[in-house]
Image (tube, rainbow, N blue to C red):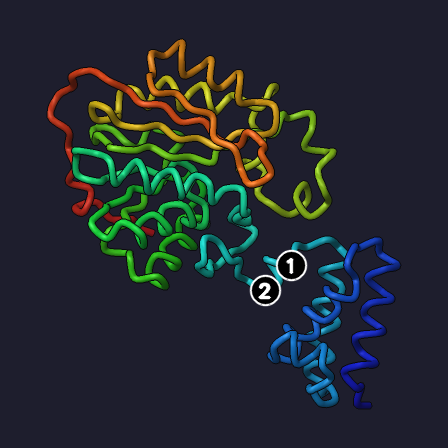
Amino acid sequence: MTVSTSDAVNAVERRLKAAGIPEARLEAQILLSLATGKPRSHVAAGLVGSLSAEQQKRLEALINARIQRTPLAYLRGTQEFFGLEFLVTPATLIPRPETELLVERGIVCLRQTSHPPVFADIGTGSGCIAISLLKHIPEAFALGVDIAADALSIALQNARRHQVAERFALLRGDKLSALKPHRFALIVSNPPYIPSAEIGTLQPEVRYHEPRHALDGGPDGLTFHRVLVEQARHLLAPNGWLLVEVAWGQAPQVQALFEEAGYSQIEVLHDLASVERAVCGQITGCWASPNFALQQTRHRG
C-alpha cells in the first residue's frame, strides 16, 4: 500500500503530538525528509511522491526513535556548528549555538598570540570547537583530548571531512593529564557543568541520550572547571589563554577560580542573549621552552 507524503506528514504529526513533542509539524516534515532522502522544503511543498514500502519502513523506525526522544541530530547524524556540518552520534555531545562563543574568542586569542598558534581542546567530543578554529586559523595546530574512544573516532572523521586532519592530533585521556609535556598558546574547553543532582531534570533528549560524562559536572557542576583552571596554568605558554564554557549562574564562581589561580586579563563573555556563557583568562610568567611539535602526535584507534 502506498502512502502520499501529505497523508504521511499528517499522520506523523499526530503521533508526535501525542508523544508530547513540540513543533510536531516541523519535525514530521524532517522525519519524512530523512526517510525519503528529499529536502524538507520539497516535503513541505508536497513535491515528494508516494512513499515506497522501504521508505515507510525507514519512517516508522525514525518515528519510534523520536518518540523515545532520540534527538533529531542523532537521527540525522549531523549538526551544524559555526557554519560547518559535523557528524554526531550518541558518543558525542550535540554542538550548540552558545558554544560558538568559544570559537569566536578562540580566534581572537590565537591571532593575538606571539607563540605558534598551537592549542588544546579538552573534551573535544565531535571536534567541533577545534576544527572550527583550525578552519579559521590556517597556520594553527590542535590537540583534541577526550576520555571516550568512540568520540575521538567521530572527531577524526570530522577532521578529515573538513580537511584539517593533518593539523589535528587526537589523544585519549582524562582532562589535562594527556597534555604533558606540551605548552599551548590556548587551552579551550566546553567541560561538563551540570550539577549531578540536576541531570534528572534535563530534557529527555539530553538526559537519556547524550553522553553522561559530557554533562555531569559533579556536585556543584564545577568539578572539571577546578581541575582545568589549576592544571592549565602549568601547560600554557607565557601569556597563553584558558577559555572555558560555563552554565547560567556559574560565571562568578569560575571567575573567582581564575583569580585565585593567578590568571590575569580575566573576562566573562556573554552570548547573544546576554547570558554569561564563558570565562577566559591569561597566564603570565616564565616557563621552560614550549614544545609545539604536536604535528608529530597522531591518534591511534
Name the residue rendered at 57%, 42% in the picture.
Answer: 211
- How far apart are labels 2 and 1 at the CA level? 6 Å
* Coordinates of residue 35 in the picture (x, y in percent): 66, 76
The answer to whether residue 206 is above or below residue 229 is below
Classify mark 1: helix, strand or loop: helix
Image quarter of the N terminus: bottom right
**Residue projecting furthest to the top:** 260
Give the residue furthest to the left: 289
Would residue 42 be found to the left or right of residue 86 on screen?
Answer: right
Q: Amino acid at mark 1?
A: Leu
Q: Secondary structure at mark 2?
A: helix
Q: Position of residue 14 (x, y in %)?
A: 87, 66
Occupied quadrant, residue 48 = bottom right
The residue lying at 79 percent from left, 55 percent from top is 21
Name the residue beneath numbered marker 1.
Answer: 72
Q: In the picture provided, is 91 more to the left or to the right than 45?
A: left
Disc marking residue 76:
2
Q: Residue at x 65, y 74 (%)?
A: 40
Q: Which mark is residue 281?
A: none
Residue type for callout 2: Arg
Numbered label tally: 2
Q: Is residue 17 above or below residue 289?
A: below
Q: Position of residue 129 (x, y in %)?
A: 41, 45
Quadrant of the rendered structure where residue 264 is? top left
Disc 2 crowd, CA 10 A, few/some/many (<14, 14-19, 20+): some
Q: Are marks 2 and 1 in contact (CB under 8 Å)?
A: yes
Image check: 203 left or right of 138?
Answer: right
- Characterize the local packing of mark 1: few (<14), some (14-19) or many (20 or more) Cα atoms within 10 angstroms: some
